[in-house]
């Protein structure tokens, strides 16, 4: 019998990677963060600094 | 030497108010990538704000209080945002080779801040005082102990974790962060690559022209700046900038993200696995764990562990002749059989004399006889059935062990296991914030692993501290640490934790020393990612070069 109430058991699918023949598993919340990081980094590198930060007198 | 006069001269000539709060920036600072550091800083501001709210009611009030629950969710998402900003900031500064031209100390302090931030986040995860904190405390202790840190830092001592998390570590972060920001402002943003050798080729110099009038114009551009800024940015055109406006905008954006996620997504807060719910819902697992502790099986996280719990140095993780765990001895001595089972059982016997005789019989028997009874009982548990409140075992010679185990099961079902463990050897009861015995009772037994498997990792528990919880991200910034445990040769080694800690310390040293490692410190120049971030600068440069050729 489960120790915690069933409604607290969401069940999370996993993604399996094989990197240098090493099986690496990650549940999708962390994987999503890494994907978001890559997207934000590329966007950050491509986008120019907003003009409104200049605050000209 | 007059220190006050020297400090005043430094502030007047070398680090002025304009350096500290700049209203101008070099034109190459023209990418959103420059906001990642500010994102981490402003997320940290929200961590502090929500953290101060959380301190008002102590470490556990948020479980049952709506305001506390919301503050905890803001804290959780601010931490996530903080590490997003921090990792992106680090990656950006790497690709820009930001340690160049004497800025190595800024890089090193930033690296130390990263390490300190990771450790502080670990104490925060431990401090959740819920299932996550319970799981992470028992998982993280092995690496700490293997590295010798366990002699001073106990992941299962919630009192120590709390004071570190809210006082010592934030103060250390504040001090290093102050130094980091001072160095950043003192030294100005690093110049684009290939910019320094010939002043005549610099875009700024070409644009500003030459002669006394141009020199005067350049001087006006640097009005109020210190000598170091003038030197570092010589020949670089400046543009208007508002540091506080930038900070305020990022602060508001961080608030929008953290508050929105806190409101709409919340934060995980699963109840703990207790002796009571194991004894009630998984009585056979409860008994198997308990008899395993008496047998000396590795069914408790502390059996046969060695330092810091026992003086058995051969059980400590070694790397060749080096075993950091042995350096400080058994700083927290625990005898699992006595402290986790027999002592609580003696208390049970005080309440119910029916258990006095079995306990006395067991303790009077020879070790060989004890082992025989325990082994027979342990084996019989495989064929045990649960009927109502009782566990039925096939007939066998268990001596007094069956009665003893029933006593321990009753203790668990009454919800008194943790209390009995806490009372032992504590002259300052009820004050105790060290939950080593309570947390480690089921730590390497099915109750914890089953829960972890069902809760989060569907058939593949992530043993370590990264630990995603349900649909929430975990400490993803530790994936680089966790991945080493996925290599079978390391995971199956007796010294797995020491190996991984050593590897990660090596990488951390490499990261800190990157500015001075020949070849590696030129890596960003080879990778050319900086050309994307500084593309306006290089485009302008190229145009001027073309004009000069005409």
Image (tube, rainbow, N blue to C red):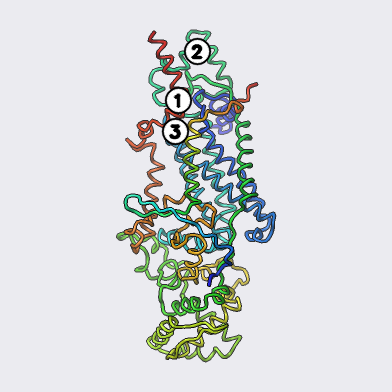
Task: Please tell me whether residue B96 is drawn above or below residue B336 in the rendered image.
Answer: above
Q: Chain of mark 3?
A: B
Circles 3 and 1 on the same chain: yes
Residue at image location 46% in from the left, 80% down from the top: B291
Q: Which residue is label 2 attached to?
A: B208
Q: Quadrant of the C terminus of chain B?
A: top left
Q: Chain of mark 2?
A: B
Residue B98 numbered tag:
3
Question: Badge 3 local density, few (<14 within 10 Å), some, or many (20+)?
Answer: many
Q: Which residue is label 1 attached to?
A: B535
In space, the residues marked 2 and 3 are separated at their CA atoms by 26 Å
Question: Badge 2 local density, few (<14 within 10 Å), some, or many (20+)?
Answer: some
Residue B164 is situated, as x and y percent measured from the top left of the image, at 56, 55
Residue A8 is situated, as x and y percent measured from the top left of the image, at 58, 62
Question: Badge 1 local density, few (<14 within 10 Å), some, or many (20+)?
Answer: some
Residue at image location 53% in from the left, 63% down from the top: B134
Circles 2 and 1 on the same chain: yes
């Amino acid at each position: 019998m489960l120790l915690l109430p069933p409604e607290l058991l969401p069940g999370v699918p996993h993604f399996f990677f094989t990197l240098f023949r090493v099986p690496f598993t990650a549940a999708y919340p962390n994987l999503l963060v890494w994907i978001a990081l890559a997207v934000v980094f590329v966007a950050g590198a491509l986008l120019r600094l907003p003009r409104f930060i200049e605050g000209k007198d | 030497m007059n220190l006050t006069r020297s400090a005043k001269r430094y502030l007047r000539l070398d680090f002025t108010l304009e350096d500290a709060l700049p209203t101008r920036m070099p034109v190459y600072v023209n990418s959103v990538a420059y906001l990642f550091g500010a994102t981490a800083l402003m997320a940290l501001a929200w961590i502090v704000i929500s953290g101060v709210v959380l301190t008002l009611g102590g470490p556990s009030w948020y479980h049952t209080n709506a305001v506390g629950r919301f503050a905890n969710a803001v804290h959780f998402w601010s931490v996530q945002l903080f590490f997003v900003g921090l990792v992106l900031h680090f990656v950006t500064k790497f690709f820009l080779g930001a340690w160049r031209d004497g800025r190595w100390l800024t890089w090193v302090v930033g690296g130390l801040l990263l390490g300190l931030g990771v450790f502080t986040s670990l104490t925060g995860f431990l401090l959740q005082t819920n299932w996550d904190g319970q799981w992470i405390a028992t998982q993280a202790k092995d690496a700490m102990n293997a590295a010798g840190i366990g002699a001073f830092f106990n992941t299962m001592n919630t009192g120590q974790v709390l004071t570190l998390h809210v006082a010592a570590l934030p103060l250390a972060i504040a001090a290093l962060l102050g130094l980091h920001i001072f160095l950043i402002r003192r030294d100005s943003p690093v110049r684009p690559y290939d910019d320094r050798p010939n002043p005549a080729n610099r875009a700024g110099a070409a644009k500003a022209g030459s002669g006394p009038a141009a020199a005067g114009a350049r001087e006006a551009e640097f009005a109020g700046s210190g000598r170091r800024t003038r030197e570092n940015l010589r020949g670089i055109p400046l543009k208007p900038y508002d540091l506080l406006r930038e900070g305020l905008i990022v602060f508001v954006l961080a608030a929008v993200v953290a508050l929105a996620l806190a409101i709409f997504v919340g934060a995980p807060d699963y109840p703990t696995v207790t002796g009571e719910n194991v004894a009630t819902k998984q009585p056979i697992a409860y008994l198997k764990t308990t008899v395993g502790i008496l047998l000396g099986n590795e069914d408790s996280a502390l059996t046969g562990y060695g330092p810091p719990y026992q003086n058995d140095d051969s059980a400590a993780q070694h790397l060749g002749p080096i075993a950091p765990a042995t350096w400080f001895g058994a700083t927290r001595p625990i005898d699992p059989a006595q402290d986790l089972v027999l002592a609580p059982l003696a208390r049970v016997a005080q309440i119910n004399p029916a258990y006095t005789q079995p306990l006395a019989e067991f303790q009077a028997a020879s070790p060989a006889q004890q082992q025989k009874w325990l082994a027979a009982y342990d084996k019989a548990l495989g064929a045990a059935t649960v009927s109502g409140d009782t566990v039925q075992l096939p007939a066998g010679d268990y001596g007094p062990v069956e009665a003893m185990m029933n006593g321990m099961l009753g203790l668990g079902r009454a919800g008194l296991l943790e209390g009995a463990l806490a009372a032992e050897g504590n002259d300052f009861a009820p004050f105790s914030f060290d939950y080593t015995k309570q947390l480690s009772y089921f730590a390497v037994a099915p109750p914890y692993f089953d829960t972890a498997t069902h809760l989060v990792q569907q058939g593949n528990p992530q043993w370590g501290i990264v630990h995603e919880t349900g649909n929430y991200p975990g400490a993803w910034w530790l994936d680089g640490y966790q991945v080493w445990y996925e290599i079978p040769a390391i995971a199956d080694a007796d010294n797995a934790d020491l190996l991984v800690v050593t590897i990660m310390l090596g990488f951390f040293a490499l990261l800190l020393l990157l500015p001075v490692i020949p070849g590696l410190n030129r890596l960003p120049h080879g990778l050319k990612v900086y050309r994307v971030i500084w593309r306006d600068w290089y485009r302008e440069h190229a145009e001027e070069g073309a004009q000069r050729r005409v």
